[in-house]
Structures are given as structure tokens and as C-alpha cells.
Amino acid sequence: MIVPKPVNHESRPGSFVLDSRTSLAADPELREVAAWLRGELGPVTAGELLPGPGSGTITLTLGDLPPEAYRLTVGQDVEIVAGGPAGAFYGSQTFRQLLPPAAFRKAATGPFTVPGAYVEDAPRFRWRGCLLDVARHFMTKHDVLRFIDLLALHKLNVLHLHLTDDQGWRIEIKRYPRLTEVGAWRGESQTGWNGAMDGRPHGGYYTQDDLREIVAYAARRHVMVVPEIDLPGHTQAAIAAYPELGNLGTPLEVRTTWGVGVNVLNVEDSTIEFFQNVLDEVLELFPSPYVMLGGDECRKDQWRASPAAQRRMAELGLRDEEELQSWLIHRFDDYLTARGRRLVGWDEILEGGLAPGAVVASWRGELGAVAAARRGHDVINCSNTSLYLDYRQGPGEEEPIPFGTVLTLEDVYAFEPVPEELRGDAAAERVLGAQCGIWTELIDSSRHVDYMAFPRLAAFAETVWSPAGRDLPGFRERLAAHLPRLEAIGVEYRRAAGPLPWQRRPGVPGRPEDPERWQAKLDAWTSNLRTL
Ligand code: TNX
């Protein structure tokens, strides 16, 4: 009962006993994976699990397979043959799931018996991501590391960290210390959506050492951390720290309310240079080939009213503010491309002309994914209507701070990463994979993240890892076996019946959408995508 479902899983005669005499051997290239597995299984084996003769042996070896693929055989011994370290890691994760849930406890004591099995497995998509918004509500470094372990357990391989927004700047930049001195804190927050102010300061940021640690910890678990520095919208925290980045001469505060703001970057050369300097530090911290620069929800009111922005448009011969945004994103695309990286932007970057090397993260439904793939751009399907895990999980009033449309476990499980319009089309190859999102305006703690993410994230993992096609009854059975693992780890997932009493947040206003209003909103959101 493996989650996500492997390509092939059969039972075999015999069984394996994991105990204090179990040994672990690995090809030199797989030493890091072996060290990680030893750490996970160590408690079960009383901390031993050393190379050498014992009762049974776990071996990790390289074989002729794609890098993320593996074959796992469980008999008297355990053999994991993998195409590369990632495959060996996924094979090891599968092996852990063959153990009883108690093995997921940090101080579990064996011995544990594993029935004979044979598993052949490889992922369907190479981008299996999850966005975590640490800008709206900060999550401690410890919580992020724990979350990475949970992604890796589900064989996801991308953590998209949304590090900056109107309400907070969470990454230390040595050259511009005020970004965190000022931008990492806000005086108070709106409770829920449009509720009263809580009167309580909120903040936090990651030092560069913290981020190096997060990146290295994730890399060991075959998770790539993709940083997002959102611009030119969603930048009020940066403007609060350095008012010269904005369009108004007047100082601003780090934003304390939710929703799309009007304060955006100006388009001066000095502002572009500022963010290029920020990116220099970002690139040093994050080795990922991809860098997310947002580009979403940039209101153009201030550019329309700004003589400087209008002058810039006239000089450049640009028709409208959409083209101005596109020009700005192009500048950053060139900057990243020259440094061997690829820009990822939300589907708004399609408006006004797409930068040549850019990857599109399509979030407003799937129209952007189709348009971008047809133009030959790589695409990550992040469709809000299927994958925004901040949306409420049931129609009931009791959902904590209900937001967006209803997105049940079954809805997420039904998601198909390749949009229907692209099926059978060569452009379907452009879909690198998909990514679910945990936006945190209304999620103010790691406990609440657990509630929103699980078990929907397990359903999502099957849509990106497992072969195409869905089998809901089969998934339910696998999930029934999986939930005790989450419990053993200490994940406060949502029960099928709804929130437990302490998971409710009565009286905190949410923003549930009724189906009609939701459709109208989607239509308005995507009207400019339709004309591309
Ligand atoms: C839209 S996804 C946003 C976020 C919000 C989210 C809430 C995207 C590119 N923009 O800023 O947090 O909706 O669901």
C-alpha cells in the first residue's frame, strides 16, 4: 500500500526482518542515500545498521535505469537497484512504507518484519512541486525542514519557496539589510479575510545560513528548492524598506491586509539594478536552474498615473502597461539567462509578450498552460481550481477560515497534469509537471498547514508520480494505509469527517466563493489569457 502508487507492485515469497543486526551496503555513488536511510532506520535497529554481516542486508546499487527509477526486491535481503541517487532514494522511501507505521516514529524499536515484495517504479513527470508561501505567514526553519521531509515521503521533488510579498520579505540580502530589518515585520495582521486587525506583530526571516541549510537538507532528499522573488507587483514589503523602489514619494508600511495591492515597483534603471543585485545573492544561495520571479497580479494603476513610467513607455515605444511589464520581465529574463538560469513566471507573463526562455507557471485554470506550451515554452501546471490547497476542503461552515472554491481530496485526485486541449498534441511534451500551492494569508501556523496540505498532498503526489489514469477506490485503500504513517510522524491532517474541534476557527471570517461568483471571477481573471 504505497503512496504514491508505484508502476508495479507484487508480493513475493519470504520476508525480511529489520532488526539491530541488519546491515546496509551501497555503491559509492549512493553513499549519501545510504547515510540518509541509516538515519531514518537507525532507531529501529538500535542505532546500528552498519556495513557488515548480520541477519539481513539492505543493498543499494546502480543499474541501467533512468535516474529516478528503481527496482526494489524484498526477500531475505532487500535489494534496491536504481538508475541514480534519486532512484535509490525513492526506492528507500518505498521500502520505509513497507514497514509498519510505527517505524515512522523517531524512537521506534524493531524488529519489524516486511513481507516479500517486488516493486518497479519511476515517476511520470519530472516537476513534482509544492509551493509554500512563507511570506504571508512565516514558517520557522524547523517547520520548513519538516515539510521537506513530508514532500520527500510523497516523492515530490520541488519546493517552491514564495519568499517575498507585500506582507513580508523573508530572505536576508547582505547588500540591502533593510529588506529584512524593515521588510520582515509587520505591525499586525488582518484576522481571516477582511476581519479585524489582531494588533499583534508578525514576522521572521531566514538568514543566508538558514537558506543554505534548507537547500542542502532538501538536496539530500532530492528536493530542489526554487526561490521566488515576486516582482513587479507583490513588493510592498520591499518598498517599505526602500521607498525609492516605489512610485509614490511617500513612505509605506509593510502591508497588514490581504488581497491584490496597488503598490508596485517603479520601472527606473536603479530599481532594475537593485533587484539584479538582490538576484546575485539569490543565485549564490540557490543552485536551482530555475528562479521564479512572479510577475503575477501586478496592478497597473500607479504606472498609469506615473509621469516617469509613462515617459519610459514612450521612450521604448510600448503600447500599454502590459507591454511595460513584459519589457521589465524580459530584462530579468536576459539577466538570468546570461547567468545560466531560467526564469519562471506566473501566467501573467504571457500578457504583453513572453520572454524567450521563460517557463510558465500556469495558475488561472489551464489556459495559460495551453497557450505557453503551444508557443514552445515549458509549462508547470499549477491550476488553482485543482491544486490550490489553501482552498477549502469541504462545503461546510465548519471548515477553518473557508477560502476559495471547494477542493476536496477527490477533486485533487482527479486532476490531470496535461490539459485536455493538449492531449495528443506534441506540445504536451512541454508540460514539465505540476505543482500544488499552499498560500498562507489565512494559514498562520504549521499546524494549520498540516490540516490544509494533508491528505490532499498525497492525492496530488499520485497525479504527478503515478502512471496516468485514476482509480479512486484503490487510492482510498492506499490512503487508509498511509494515514497511520502520517499520524506516527505527527501530521495533523484533515479527517474525512472534517475538522477536529481544535482545528476549527469559529468567528474568523473567510472568503468562500459560491459557484456563480467563482465562475465570474475565473472568467474575469482569464479574459486576457483568452485573447492570446
Ligand atoms: C493568487 S497564485 C495569488 C496569490 C494568493 C493566492 C490565494 C498567484 C500567482 N497569486 O498571491 O496568495 O491567489 O489563493
Image: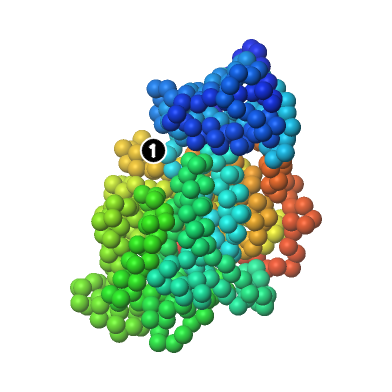
In the image: residue 207, left or right of residue 343:
right
In the image: residue 402, left or right of residue 261:
right
Q: Which residue lies furthest to the right in this view?
A: 501
Q: Residue 204: which quarter of the image? A: bottom right
Secondary element at image label 1 = loop
In the image, the residue with mark 1 has its CB under 8 Å from the nearest atom of ligand 1: no
- Above or below — where is 248 with respect to 181? below
Q: Where is residue 296 in the image (x, y as percent from the top left)?
A: 42, 63
Q: Which residue is found at the position 53% from the left and 38% from the top? A: 155
In the image: residue 349, left or right of residue 97:
left
- Residue 229 can be seen in this image: yes
Which quadrant is the N terminus positioned in? top right
Q: Which one is in front, 393 or 212?
A: 212
Q: Which residue is found at the position 65% from the left and 60% from the top? A: 445
Q: How crowded is mark 1: few (under 14 residues within 10 Å), some or many (20 or more)?
A: few
Q: Which one is in front, 412 or 146?
A: 146
Q: Which residue is found at the position 50% from the left and 71% from the top? A: 180
Task: Identify the image's colour scheme: rainbow, by chain, secondary structure or one colour.
Answer: rainbow
Q: Which residue position is annotated with label 1? A: 423
Q: Which residue lies furthest to the top in this view?
A: 13
Which quadrant is the C terminus positioned in? bottom left
Q: Which residue is found at the position 42% from the left and 39% from the top? A: 126
Q: Position of residue 27 (x, y in %)?
A: 46, 26
Q: Position of residue 160 (x, y in %)?
A: 48, 53
Q: Position of residue 463 (x, y in %)?
A: 52, 39
Q: Residue 113: which quarter of the image? A: top right
- Residue 299 can be seen in this image: no
Count numbered badges in the picture: 1
